Image: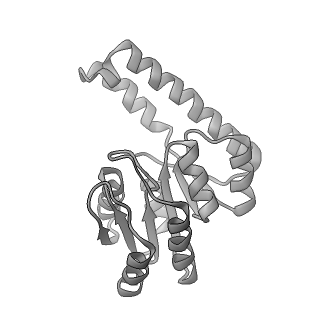
Amino acid sequence: MEAAIRNGVRKKVLCLVGGAFAQRFADIATACGKEVELLKVEQGRTVEADQVRAALRASGADAVTVCHSESATGALAPVAEIAQVVALAHARGTRVTAHSGNLAGARVGVVAGVDAIEHGFELDTDLAAEMSSRGTFLVSTLAIFRSWESFAHTTRLARFAEKVGRARIAARRERAEESVRLARAAGVRIATGTD
C-alpha cells in the first residue's frame, strides 16, 4: 500500500473508505506526507460512483484508492461501480489502485481497469496475462509474511501463534510467491511494498 502511495500519488489522493483496510490506505498516505481527501461511508457499505464523481470534482485529487474486498467487513464493491470510478478518475488523468489479497478481488480490479493491484496474493496465469496486456502493476507485499511469522513469538493470537494458524500463513506465503512468479513470467510490472 505504501509503495502505491509513494509511487502513484503526486500530491493529493482521494481515499474511498468503508472499513479498516480502506482507512489504512488513507493513514499511509498521510504518513507519506500526501494531502488526503476522505470519502467515507458507513462501515460495511461501499462507495457509489455518483459519490466519487462529486468528490473527484471537488477535491482535485490526482489519485484514488479503492478497496474492492474490505477484509474488515466482507463488503465487496461491485465491478460496475469500480469501473465507473476508474473511468472517472482516468478521464481526469488520475490513477487508481486497488487493495486485494484474493483472486476474485484482483480479477474485479483488473477488469474494472485499475492501474495497480496491492497484494495480489492469489493471481493465476490468466489474470497475470490480463494484467500484462492492460499494463496493470502488481504491488507485491511479500514482506508482510515475515511480520506475520514473527508474531508467533510475540502474541497469543491463534492466527499467528497456533500451529494451524502458522500453517495457513506458510501456505498463503507460498501461494503469494507463486503469484509473483506468474506475474513476472507474464511481463507484469512489479513494485514492492509493505502493508
Extreme residue in the top direction: 163
Which of 93/58 is in front? 58
Question: Is residue 192 depicted above or below 42 in this figure?
Answer: above
Question: Is residue 56 depicted above or below 3 in this figure?
Answer: below
Extreme residue in the bottom direction: 57
Q: Is residue 96 left or right of residue 186?
A: left
Q: Residue 132 lies in what quarter of the image?
A: bottom right
Q: Residue 166 lies in what quarter of the image?
A: top left
Q: Position of residue 119 (x, y in %)?
A: 51, 46
Q: Is residue 164 left or right of residue 37?
A: right
Q: Is residue 187 left or right of residue 104?
A: right
Q: Residue at x 37, y 67 (%)?
A: 15
Task: Look at the image and tell me whether residue 164 can be seen.
Answer: yes
Task: Look at the image and tell me whether residue 139 can be seen.
Answer: no
Q: Position of residue 101 (x, y in %)?
A: 50, 43
How many numbered circles does the render carry?
Answer: 0
Tell me, what colour scheme is on the image? one colour
Q: Residue at x 33, y 15 (%)?
A: 162
Q: Residue at x 54, y 73 (%)?
A: 84
Q: Position of residue 183 (x, y in %)?
A: 68, 45
Q: Residue at x 55, y 61 (%)?
A: 79
